[in-house]
Image (cartoon, rainbow, N blue to C red):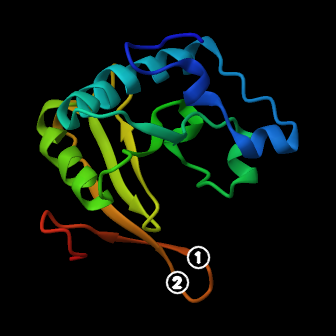
Amino acid sequence: MTPLTEHFTKEELVGSQEGARRGIDNTPSPDIVRNLIRLCDQILEPLRNAISRPIVVSSGYRCAALNAAVRGSKNSDHLRGLAADITAPGMDLDELAEKVRTLAPYVPLRQCIKEFAQWIHVSCTPENDDYAADFVPQFLVATLNDKGETVYSPWSSNGRVS
């Protein structure tokens, strides 16, 4: 295992069951690895410390072929190694998302999305991003409409869609 930070490895941030099934090479470039380290160091480690329990990463970096295979957004932060879809065993998604919200003023959070009542998507701003200091993170809920398309709605701190 190749550690990125104390509690997160490169393998868990680039591994993909879908990629393995389809024979997709999801090997990250050195720039992507630097972004993964930033994501782990600046978002995932502080969150793990705040909740005092492990975090399971179901999706981290995705190369273009893997992102297309899972029907990810063409602008996804997963493509740059700046996002992870996570859960925390024994912790409710709303509680996990709320913990991310409490960390937001202290970390370079870009997005926190409760996706399809299955996981939390977190992403960080890129390093040396000029607008990052003034950036206001997005808190969203992703659901599917009747056509099977992903719809994003604002998520308020009381856990309700606003």
Q: Quadrant of the C terminus?
A: bottom left
Q: In which quadrant of the rendered view does residue 105 lie?
A: top left
* Image coordinates for residue 143, horizontal then vertical, percent: 46, 74
* Image coordinates for residue 123, horizontal then vertical, percent: 39, 40
The kind of residue on which mark 1 rests is Glu
Q: Which residue lies furthest to the right in this view?
A: 23
On screen, 135 above or below 115? above
On screen, 159 above or below 85? below
* Image coordinates for residue 22, horizontal then vertical, percent: 86, 44
Left or right of 148? Residue 120 is left
Q: How many marks?
A: 2
Q: In which quarter of the image is the N terminus?
A: top right
Q: Residue furthest bottom?
A: 146
Q: How crowded is mark 2: few (under 14 residues within 10 Å), some or many (20 or more)?
A: few
On screen, 73 above or below 106? below
Left or right of 150? Residue 37 is left
Report which residue position mark 2 lands on. 145
Left or right of 60? Residue 107 is left
The kind of residue on which mark 2 rests is Asn
From the viewer's side, name the closer residue of 94 and 80.
94
On screen, 69 above or below 4? below
Report which residue position mark 1 lands on. 149
Q: Which residue is drawn at 24% across and 47% down?
A: 137
Q: Residue at x 26, y 61 (%)?
A: 94
Q: In which quadrant of the rendered view does residue 106 lie?
A: top left
